[in-house]
């Protein structure tokens, strides 16, 4: 297995001692030493504490989880940007003055209300609103504490020549993909909309199955 495969397996066991230790401790950014002497050069600084001291939305110089970012479409080249954001955890309180809802009793609940979409969609929308000239490609979880959840959002510059000339990603340059995160067209947005769920997606028609098995399909990149 390659290095990314080991990192992927490690991220799947988030309750393990190794992963919980890695979430708390980070290496010195400027003095990256070999593993033999790394323990003596570790900075005793929790990663969540570091994120809390930064702005709510700030640009990251590199992804915290490179294997996850690459699986979601990130490339370490010009035109790709990583932004980190924190979102307050918990349910959605009804925004009414003094907790008074002027209406029918069935609508008078203020607390214990749940937002229909996940916090990750909220993170994507806020980053997309901040970076209006970029397009949101995807996002992933990086950390959480008792108050916040932290995400990293992958954005693409549609006006950069490197992106416009790349046949694998220049589809996002089309005007139809503006503010795609606000219209729930990203991966987590489709998940919250229920796309790909339910009894309608569990079976395929007999004709479609026959056609798929008897058609030669050659991918563009193979």
Image: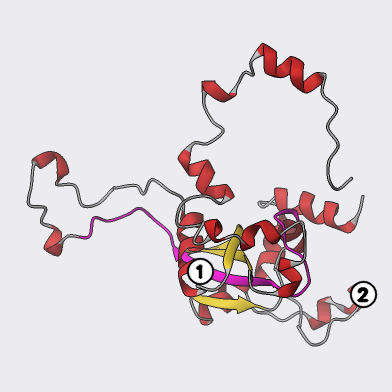
State whether residue 142 appears in this view.
Answer: no
Left or right side of 113 for 117: right
Residue closest to the eye, 71 or 10: 71
Q: Which residue lies at the image location 14% right of the left edge and 39% below the top edge?
A: 106
Q: Position of residue 37 (x, y in %)?
A: 89, 79
Q: Is residue 94 magenta?
A: yes
Circle 2/circle 1 CB separation < 8 Å: no
Query: In front: 206, or 73?
Result: 206
Q: Is residue 3 left or right of residue 161?
A: right
Residue 80 is situated, as x and y percent measured from the top left of the image, at 69, 70
> Taking the image as drawn, is residue 163 in sight?
yes
Is tag 2's residue or tag 1's residue first in the polypeptide sequence? 2
Q: Please give the residue where the numbered disc 1 appears in the rendered image.
A: 127
Q: Which residue does the numbered mark 2 point to in the structure image? A: 36
Please give left or right for residue 218 compared with residue 105 in the image: right
Q: Residue at x 45, y 59 (%)?
A: 122
- Which residues, given as a range, are shown in magenta? 71-95
Near-viewer residue (217 or 132)? 217
**The C terminus is located in which quarter?**
top right
């Amino acid at each position: 297995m390659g290095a990314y495969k080991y990192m992927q397996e490690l991220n799947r066991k988030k309750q393990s001692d190794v992963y919980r230790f890695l979430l708390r401790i980070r290496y010195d950014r400027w003095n990256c030493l070999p593993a033999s002497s790394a323990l003596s050069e570790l900075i005793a600084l929790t990663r969540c504490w570091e994120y809390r001291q930064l702005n709510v939305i700030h640009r990251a110089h590199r992804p915290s989880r490179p294997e996850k970012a690459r699986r979601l479409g990130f490339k370490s080249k010009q035109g790709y940007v990583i932004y980190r954001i924190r979102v307050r955890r918990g349910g959605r309180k009804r925004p009414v003055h003094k907790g008074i809802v002027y209406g029918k009793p069935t609508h008078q609940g203020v607390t214990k209300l749940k937002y229909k979409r996940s916090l990750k969609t909220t993170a994507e929308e806020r980053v997309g609103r901040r970076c209006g000239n970029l397009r949101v490609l995807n996002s992933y979880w990086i950390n959480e504490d008792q108050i916040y959840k932290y995400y990293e959002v992958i954005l693409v510059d549609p006006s950069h020549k490197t992106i416009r000339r790349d046949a694998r990603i220049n589809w996002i340059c089309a005007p139809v993909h503006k503010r795609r995160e606000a219209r729930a067209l990203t991966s987590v947005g489709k998940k919250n909309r229920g796309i790909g769920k339910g009894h309608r997606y569990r079976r395929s028609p007999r004709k479609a199955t026959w056609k798929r098995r008897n058609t030669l399909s050659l991918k563009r990149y193979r």
